[in-house]
Amino acid sequence: MAGIPFAFGKDDVFSGTGSCPYCTTGGMSSPEHFQAKHVKHAIHFEDNGIQKYCVACFCLNARQQNRCHWHCSKCQHILCRAPDFKKHLHNHNISVTCKITNNPDKMPSSEKPKAGQQVKEQPPVICIDERNGIFVTPKDAHGPRVPVHVKKQVVLGSIACESPLCRDFMRIGVESGNPGIECDHLQRTNRAVCYSAPAALREDFAVNG
């Protein structure tokens, strides 16, 4: 995959000649072939305000060579499932979007919120120790809210997450030349609120009967 683009601008297609590097059949590459066979299954996203998309490929760089996979254009990490790739993009603070159309303000009717349907809230994040930069937030965006603690003290350069998966993710980022990468839990600290202790109960408080 050396020299082969991992991501394309919304109006770009692969125009290389010879065998298509994104296929397993060795078909000839052309803009028409790329548009018809690969773009329709692409994952679209927005990176720094620029609309892009990424197509799956079957190159020999992946461990599972019998199935398609995705190359991250940020850290060159390879992922073999589209949902995992979308989550990986989210960890890079990249927004996955619906397929780009001539009218980007419109989304497919199947993705529009139904009448009376509530928009899902962002996972909460609370600063429990402002001096040392300690935060608590749900481990997962959905399901039971199991807490996970993170530390982000910019002045002292202390940034950490207690999740082993997140530590592995950030270690891979450092090894790939992206030392500033943060997991989803750390990214949430940008909208954290400070913890407020509940009011103390008074002994003389009585319930009106």
Image (tube, grey):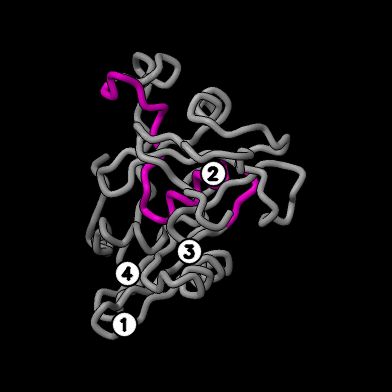
Seen in the picture, residue 195 relative to 24 is either above or below; the reply is: below
Where residue 174 sits: x, y (%)? Answer: 46, 74
* Mark earlier in primary sequence (2, 1): 2
Where residue 125 sits: x, y (%)? Answer: 34, 57
In this rendered view, identify the residue nearer to me: 172 or 31. 31
Q: Is residue 19 magenta?
A: no
Residue where numbered disc 2 is placed: 143
Q: CA distance from mark 2 to mark 3?
A: 14 Å
Q: Secondary structure at mark 2?
A: loop
In what quadrant of the picture does the C terminus appear?
A: top left
Q: CA distance from mark 2 to mark 1?
A: 32 Å
Q: CA distance from mark 1 to mark 3?
A: 20 Å
Looking at the image, which residue is at 28% across and 19% down? 103
* Mark earlier in primary sequence (1, 3): 3
Q: What mark, if any, has residue 128 been given in the picture? A: 4
Query: Foreground mark, 4 or 1?
Result: 1
* Amino acid identity at mark 2: Gly
